[in-house]
Image (tube, grey):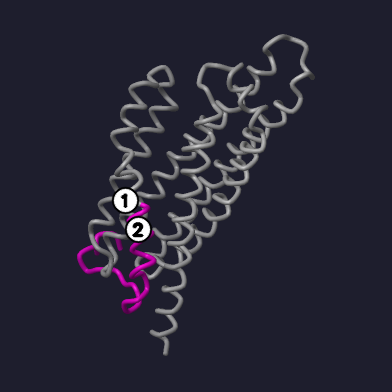
Amino acid sequence: MEHTTKNTAQRGAAVAAGISLLIMAAAAALCYGWIHGTIVIPDDPAATAANLRSSSALFKAEIFGWLVILICDAAAAWALYLFFEPVHRGLSLLGAWLRLAYTAMLGTAVAALAAALLLSDRSGALSAPGLNDSLILLSLDLFDFVWSIGLVVFGLHLLTLGLLALRAASLPRWIGFLLLLASVGYVAVHSLRILLPEGNDAVSLLETILAAPMAAGELGLALWLLARGGRQPALQASTRSEAFS
């Protein structure tokens, strides 16, 4: 009976985490990949402000999408903690706190998007020509900067997941390796974005190269969690990973 209860709890945590991760991936592709990229024109405050004013409803949809992501991030942090707790409680707890810290930073970044929206609604409030447009672009740049800081923390969260996946007896090792590769990608790309803003073209090229493995780590884990997570006997640490004890 105890094993059945543990299996049921782990299956529920696996499904909750998998669904949350997939919803976030879809919402991020819509919010940042499409809406944000359509409205924001880098280094062109006037064009960006004009797009924002003409597409304010679309921009509000982006902000709503980020709120959905924030809720799913918090749910995923808790569900992943419950799922991996039997493998290593301390590492699983660290991973949960790192994801919650990332979620808090993302929430701060989304506040900058709200500021840009409010500035676009008050385009006549500032008399200096172009000042309002510049403030809008500054708010959008602040979103990118704060989010990049958060994504460094997110990369560290993926590091903990990768170590937990490698330690777990029932998870395929390729998931652990993909998560570790994604961790390196997030930390490297977004550390460079923070430290070397003038090298943006080189950083963008690096991000393009690492985009597939960065996405594959969490997506691979999400699909495995939905298909297989918690179906086996209660998740346990593998003897191959005693070094993490």
Taking 97 as reference, is 114 above or below it? above
Which residue position holds label 1?
Answer: 179
For numbered disc 1, what is the local secondary structure?
helix
> Toward which corner of the image does residue 116 lie, by quadrant?
top right
Name the residue furthest left.
Answer: 240
Q: Position of residue 160 (x, y in %)?
A: 36, 53
Q: Which residues are magenta?
A: 218-245
Question: Looking at the image, is mark 2 or mark 1 nearer the viewer?
Answer: 2
As helix, strand or loop, the secondary structure at mark 2 comes to helix
Residue 132 spot, x, y in % from top left: 69, 18
At x 49%, y 51%, the residue is 24
Q: Quick one: 148 or 45, which is closer to the camera?
A: 45
CB atoms of marks 2 and 1 within 8 Å: yes
Give the number of the disc on residue 221. 2
Residue farthest top in this picture: 129
Q: Nearer the viewer, residue 5 or 86?
A: 5
Measured from the top left, where is residue 87 in percent x and y? Answer: 34, 67
